[in-house]
Amino acid sequence: MRLRNVPGARENIAKHELAINEPEKNKGKWNEEFGNDNPIQLEIGMGKGLFLTTLAQENPNINYVGIEKYSSVLVRALEKCEDLELDNIRFIRMEAEYIEDVFGEGEVDKIYLNFSDPWPKDRHAKRRLTSKQFLGRYDHILKKDGVVEFKTDNDDLFEFTVEQIPEAGWVPVAVIFDLHSDEEHVKGNVMTEYETKFSKLGHPIHKVVMKR
Ligand code: SAH
């Protein structure tokens, strides 16, 4: 993600009603935040939020939480929501490593990871959002039959992810090399900002769905 300093980004997030400033307080009771018992789905590393705001409009009976570590990017997602009057979406500015402090055991239905940072150096492998270390964290917050859905154009990260699945004791549900030419799996696909950009450049989009 190319970062620009957005003046006042932190302040805007702090006072925005869709941004949760003390997310640990909602741990185990996100249903109270949303005022219903609908399923909760996360996107970790949400960027400017096109994917999640589209899903929230399409599925009013699902609650969405977008997680992003940079305020300069997260404010763009908040701006997207301005005229949409959505009540099923919230945002958190946080580092995903601490996700277990924010969601309780089995509280989350599904986790989306889209175009996650590749961290190409071997010594940074555990920072990748599909590493066995992260899958271990998701294991705690995902409900029993919950899934993680991952999209990327990065061949190395795709390959790494497929290898991490058994290492973490998970199983693949679908491994798709070229999502956009796969008639069955592309149905209902919601594009992300990065997906649009990289598919225009001719990169095949890879997708992996995994569960325990
Ligand atoms: N999902 C978006 C953005 C992809 S870029 C899309 O597909 O268009 C990856 C995003 O993940 C960046 O905005 C980056 O800041 C965020 N990110 C990467 N690692 C993160 C982490 N550990 N915790 C929270 N956000 C993270």
Image (tube, rainbow, N blue to C red):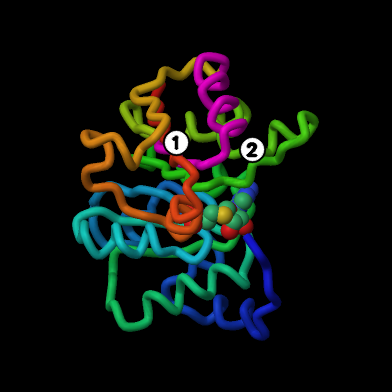
Q: Is residue 152 magenta?
A: yes
Q: Which mark is residue 128?
A: 2
Q: What amino acid type should be assigned to the residue bearing mark 1?
A: His
Assign a secondary structure to mark 1.
Answer: strand
- Where the C terminus falls, by quadrant? top left
Q: Give the overall secondary structure of the magenta segment.
A: helix
Instruction: Give coordinates of residue 144: x percent, y percent.
Output: 34, 27
Q: Is residue 25 visible?
A: no
Tell whether 182 sits left or right of 50. Answer: left
Task: Report which quarter residue 51 is drawn in.
Answer: bottom left
Amino acid found under the numbered disc labelled 2: Arg
Q: Of the numbered discs in the image, which one, if any, rests on residue 120? A: none
Q: Are marks 2 and 1 in contact (CB under 8 Å)?
A: no
Which numbered disc covers residue 206? 1
Q: Depth check: give the residue in front, 98 or 173.
A: 173
Q: CA distance from mark 2 to mark 1?
A: 16 Å
Secondary element type, mark 2: loop
Is 94 displayed left or right of 42 in the figure? right
The residue carrying pointer 2 sits among few (fewer than 14), some (14 to 19) or many (20 or more) residues within 10 Å by Cα, namely some
